[in-house]
Image: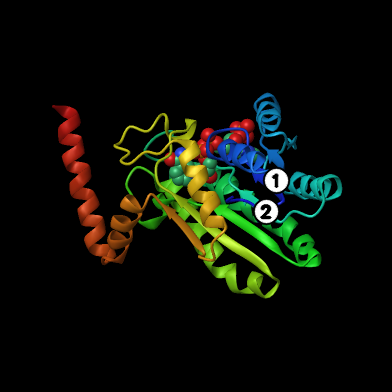
Amino acid sequence: MAGKGFRNVWITGGSSGIGRALALYYGRVGARVAVSGRNEERLEEAARACGGAAYPLDVTDAAAVERTVAAIWEREGPLDLAILNAGAAFKRAGRDDTAANLKKHLEVNLLGVAYALDALRPRMREAGGGTIALVGSLAGYAGLPRTSGYGTSKAALGYYAEALWAELEREKIRLKLISPGFVKTPIVAANEFPMPFMLEPDEAARIIARGLERPAFEIAFPRRLAWPLRLLRALPASWRVRLFAAAERRAARGRSR
Ligand SMILES: NC(=O)c1ccc[n+]([C@@H]2O[C@H](COP(=O)([O-])OP(=O)(O)OC[C@H]3O[C@@H](n4cnc5c(N)ncnc54)[C@H](OP(=O)(O)O)[C@@H]3O)[C@@H](O)[C@H]2O)c1
């Protein structure tokens, strides 16, 4: 049965969407599951549904992250898998709001992950190793229009994971990057652009769990979206920006009709 390798799992953003589906998955295969998120009601419900424990947490608070990881280690025992999945997308307030909007994204999607990684690393090292999976996005593959804050934070997360892989490997910590395409969750509900090949959270959780059992660094899915984006990423950036600008002009003409 997939998932048999992980016995003690912590999932941030476990109260909703992909994180909740992962919590249920690992609960079903018999792992001990701890979930974190800010909304205590939703978190308690998810913990009950997966037979696990709720650890309320705002990942942007570094001291709280350290305290929570210490509490999990103490009460649940050494983790062998942490899925740093908590993430958010914020609408821009206006044209001239790129910095404030980027800051909000970096605080949750990048620093929130880094705080958790720094809290987990010495403990996992001492316990002899473990797996830390970071949830990025296919949106980080190229500078897609209309997602400057979110996309930049996810591109940076991919860089961060790649840059740290070798040092963590020497400590027997396997770092994995999860790069989902579109998954039907509240985070994408307000998107006003096409979202091809959308998956249900359960399907995404199964793909992620399978990928976590395998040695590859990155779990990018669905393949039918990941491959075209990889090809797009391989183009010269000067071509990409022109392609995106033309697509945006076409979309604007479509909207005004
Ligand atoms: N859905 C997609 O199409 C898609 C595609 C690519 C990547 N992703 C990534 O997948 C991850 C999960 O997203 P999702 O689609 O499952 O969205 P979701 O249903 O909105 O779940 C986001 C989770 O993150 C938690 N969260 C947000 N801000 C937090 C904070 N400051 N501290 C602690 N927890 C926080 C939320 O709980 P609280 O609000 O209670 O804190 C919630 O449990 C995110 O990293 C997202 O960027 C999603």
- Earlier residue among tags 1 and 2: 2
- Whole-percent x, y for residue 248 in the image: 22, 43
Q: Vertical placement of 231 versus 43: above or below?
A: below
Q: Residue furthest right?
A: 74
Residue 57 versus residue 85: which sits nearer the camera? 85
Name the colouring of the figure: rainbow
- Callout 2: helix, strand or loop? loop
Residue 121: horizontal and vertical position, in percent?
Answer: 73, 62
Q: Is residue 72 visible?
A: yes
Q: Residue at x 64, y 57 (%)?
A: 132
Quadrant of image for the C terminus: top left
- Picture coordinates of residue 155, whole percent (x, y): 45, 56
Corner quadrant of residue 47: top right
Find residue 127 and name its label.
none
Inspect the image, locate mark 1, and give the three-letter code of the amino acid beneath it.
Ala
Q: Is residue 19 left or right of residue 9?
A: left
User: Which residue is outermost to the front?
Assistant: 1
Which label is found at residue 31?
Answer: 1
Label 2 within 8 A of ligand 1 by Cβ: no
* Relative depth, front residue between 91 and 67: 67
Left or right, 81 with reference to 208:
right
For marks 1 and 2, give the CA distance. 7 Å
- Would you say the residues marked 1 and 2 are in contact, meaning their CB atoms lie under 8 Å apart? yes
Q: Which of the four quarters of the rendered structure image does ligand 1 lie in?
A: top right
Question: What is the three-letter code of the residue carrying label 2?
Answer: Phe
Give the residue at mark 2: 6
Q: Closest to the observer: 150 or 48?
A: 48
Q: How dense is the environment of label 2, judged by Cα within 10 Å: few (below 14), some, or many (20 and up)?
A: many
Mark 1 Cα-neighbour bin, 10 Å: few <14, some 14–19, many ≥20: many
